[in-house]
Amino acid sequence: MTSTSTPPGLARFNDLEEPAALAALHEACASTAWARRLLAARPYATPEALYSASDAATVELGEADLAEAMAGHPPIGRPRPGDPTSAREQSGMAGAADGLKAEMLELNLAYQERFGHVFLICATGRTGEEMRDAVKERIGNPPEREREIVRTELGKINRIRLARLVEEDA
């Protein structure tokens, strides 16, 4: 492959019919506005161009769009049954002790009561203890600060999911 050629996974994404591309993007992020913005900018020459477009679209999400994106994420420690993505991303909680799982459930509920949405963190590569410590730290944030942290975490998650999308084998 030459340095100017588009990687095969990205080429496949660029070539998808609009409904299939929209569905693939919704797998990465539940925000319709985010997905439509990325869809409109195709084709992408490089994965980095796609990731940069994702970052820009994430920054531009309005309150309703951000809420829509967060609604696509299950609480930490409770991945959706049959959803390999959330199970993989939250694997740090899978082998956690029952006490830690119970504590995380309580913290999730307290966080959701305070902010009105799930605790969102890029869980990939984090241990259960790290996620617990993060929610404990963040629950005291002012809502405006927490919203910006959520936006940053969502951007990280979106990049990881897009990388999986464009690096998949045919």
Image (cartoon, helix red, strand yellow):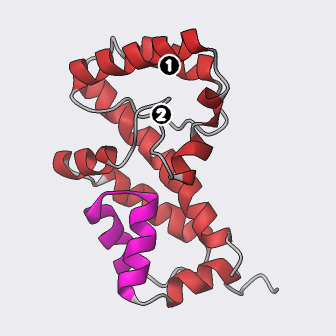
Disc on res. 121 = 2
Is residue 2 left or right of 127 when viewed as pictured? right
Q: At 60% from the left edge and 27% from the top edge, which residue is drawn?
A: 93
Badge 1, how many Cα within 10 Å: few under 14, some, many 20+?
Answer: few
Is residue 19 left or right of 44 when viewed as pictured? left
> What x and y, as percent, mark residue 10?
61, 78
Q: For residue 114, which quarter of the picture?
A: top left
Q: Looking at the image, is mark 2 or mark 1 earlier in the sequence?
A: 2
User: In the rendered image of this protein, does residue 13 appear above or below residue 64?
Assistant: below
Disc on res. 31 = none
Q: Which residues are magenta?
A: 18-41
User: In the rendered image of this protein, does residue 25 appear above or below residue 82?
Assistant: below
> What x and y, as percent, mark residue 59?
34, 51
Amino acid at pointer 1: Ala
User: In the rendered image of this protein, does residue 131 appear above or below residue 57?
Assistant: above
Q: Is residue 79 magenta?
A: no
* Closer to us: 131 or 159: 131
> What x and y, as percent, mark residue 14?
52, 85
Q: For residue 73, which quarter of the picture?
A: top left
Q: Is residue 40 magenta?
A: yes
Helix, strand or loop for the magenta stretch, by majority: helix
Q: At 43% from the left edge and 79% from the top edge, which residue is drawn?
A: 21
- Give the residue at mark 1: 134
Amino acid at pointer 2: Ile
Look at the image and tell me in which quarter the N terminus lies.
bottom right
Dot 1 falls on a residue whose secondary structure is: helix
Mark-to-mark CA distance, 2 and 1: 8 Å
Q: At 48% from the left edge and 54% from the top edge, which residue is drawn?
A: 158
